[in-house]
Image (cartoon, rainbow, N blue to C red):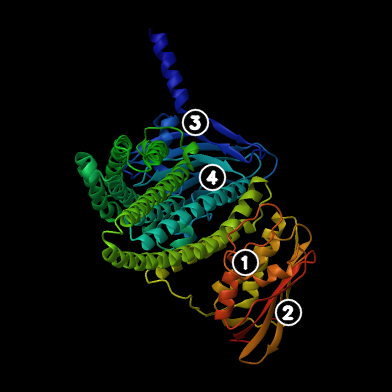
Amino acid sequence: MRVWLALLLCCWMLAAQATEQALDGTHPRMDLAPVLSVLEDPTATLTADAVAALPATHLRATVATDFILGYSRSAFWYHATLRNSASDTHDYWLEVGDARLHDVSAHIQQQGQWHHAQAGAAYPVAERPITAHSAVFPVRLAPGEVVQVYVRVVSPTALNTRFVLWDPTAFRAAEARENLIDGILFGGLLLVVGYNAFIALSVRERSFLYLALGALFFLINQIALRGYGAQYLWPGTPLWARASMAPTLMLATALIIFFQRRMLQTATLTPRWDRALMAMGWALLVLVPIGAWVDYRFAARAFNWIGLAGMVAFVVVSVIGYRNRLRAMGLYVLASLVLVFSTTPVTLLAMGLTIDPERLRWVPVAGMLLTMLLWSYALHAHFSQLQKAREQAQDALLAQQGSEQVRLERTVLERTDQLRDALARANAANRGKSLLLAHISHDLRAPVATILGYARQWRQQAVGHAAPAAIERNAHYQMSLIEDLLDYACVELDEAVLYPQTGDLPDFLTDIGADARQLAEQADLRCELALDTGLPRQVVADFKRLRQALMNLLSNAVKFTPHGGIALRVTVVAQSPASCQLLFEVEDTGIGLSAEALQRIFEPFELGPAPGQPSGVGLGLAISSHYLKLMGSSLQVQSQPGQGSRFHFTLSLPVMDAPAA
């Protein structure tokens, strides 16, 4: 018996010893979990010297649950021994956890000396050893050198960690791929926000507003959780990193609950569940300031339990609505199931109840995007059915009026005149809203096309270093369109106005050329950008409207050119110290236009003879021509069938400085 006890004790002591990790520089990514040992510090007061001086038996070998600890006030020390078995010096980057970890410090004992570094959401990006979304620390190993690495992790957020030793080049490549995927998903959420905000302001329906705001706060939450906020939006204010994580998700969940109540009519359909949903929504609103400024751990734990209860409530009320034959309820049930299956594992992960965080990286944002799209489509179907019911009621009323015409001829005639007036006003209002929706839809589609182009390049492993910047530039452009929509839809439909501002003309045209080149490469076309050397540097113009006009012309040139190329040329026609006159030309070697097509090419909804299946709604040239008229110019075209087309216009712009060098 004593022999067995001795053997068990020896096995336990061996398990408590961390295995040494040999490094030869041939692996771009290594998971250090098998060689780590861990120590919990309940008081969070131990130092690196104190931990290093402890007997080896105080640290135990890690298991899977040691990297998913949920919420804890303790500090956790992780230890690893690294040895360079190669014959030359190697540099590595040690990545610890994700961007939500608050305070991560690395203590490296190398040649008898300590090297300390700190990272995490509690520190500005400029103070971190390596600029990255997560906590990353550099480790340099000389030939045959052995170092001791101690990492201390303490955070009010969920303690979900991972320890990966990267080759720096491989780390940046993986980071670029993650940025590209995040950019595509975030762009989809922006589309959901803009679409529902526009519909909310157009039809004066709060359900769309709740959905738009819920998607917006969820987008902000994901930007904060993935480290983009700390790196780009508030790099010098770490306080916002914690305040923008759980509180924004609480706001998003509360708004989604209010959306469900209104769309499913729970107040009349199922009062008990309605009171439960109302209590959950207000409880989440109360937790927002607590999580932001008082006790993050308490608020996060409470939110997780309320969130799980909310998932159950969503499914139950959706099924009740489906059984009561509410409109579009099949889509609501499907959306609720998608929401449950995409968010429940992440909630359990935050509570320390699951052990596979790597597979859940894009699950919440992709699931929420799909849920939002299903809800948006269901809302659209719901109101389309309501509109159809109204139209059927109007038809029935008109038929009844016709049958009673003999008996109530005078009354019917008077009533018919009133109905015709009301119907004319309603049709005029609907046409205005439809025209506005068509313009905005066309403008929102242009940046998405660029983003999708880079996404295709990524799938083909051909993405370049310019892809993240281009995606961010088009996303910012799309965000500006959405902001204009929110301001523009607050008033009655009116003519567009210009907002001129001072800007760098050569840089602006270079960006236009880059986007045009990307579109041309997708269609295997050449793209030429010719800028006059005498272009002024700083001019005053409405760059957003000018960009829309030029991109409409360039995208049309690509669409109607099966082979050959396109060109954008900008020439100085006349110049004075205060202004300049520029000639903009967009040429292509495409299929050209007939004389009949030239007469109606600038009319709205007019589609040109594109090869293959026509695309678009025929608004590009009409929009471009309208914007250029506001700028005091006129869009002209010369074209013949089979010989390509040339669109050009002359624009006078105030000059703020000397010509560009």
Sooner in the amino-acid sequence: mark 3 or mark 1? 3
Name the residue type under label 1. Answer: Asn
For residue 514, say whether it is visible.
Answer: no
Tags 1 and 4 in contact by the CB under 8 Å rule?
Answer: no
How far apart marks 3 and 4 lie (CA) works out to 17 Å
Sooner in the amino-acid sequence: mark 1 or mark 4? 4
Residue located beneath label 1 in the image: 552
Q: Quadrant of residue 55?
A: top left
Give 273 or 623, whichever is nearer the viewer.
Answer: 623
For residue 524, say whether it is visible.
Answer: yes
How far apart marks 1 and 2 lie (CA) works out to 22 Å
Looking at the rendered image, the disc whose residue lies closer to the viewer, 3 or 1, is 1
Looking at the rendered image, the disc whose residue lies closer to the viewer, 3 or 2, is 2
Tags 2 and 4 in contact by the CB under 8 Å rule?
Answer: no
Rate crowding at label 4 as few (under 14), some (14 to 19) or many (20 or more) other CA atoms within 10 Å: many
Which percent across, then down, holds residue 661?
70, 81
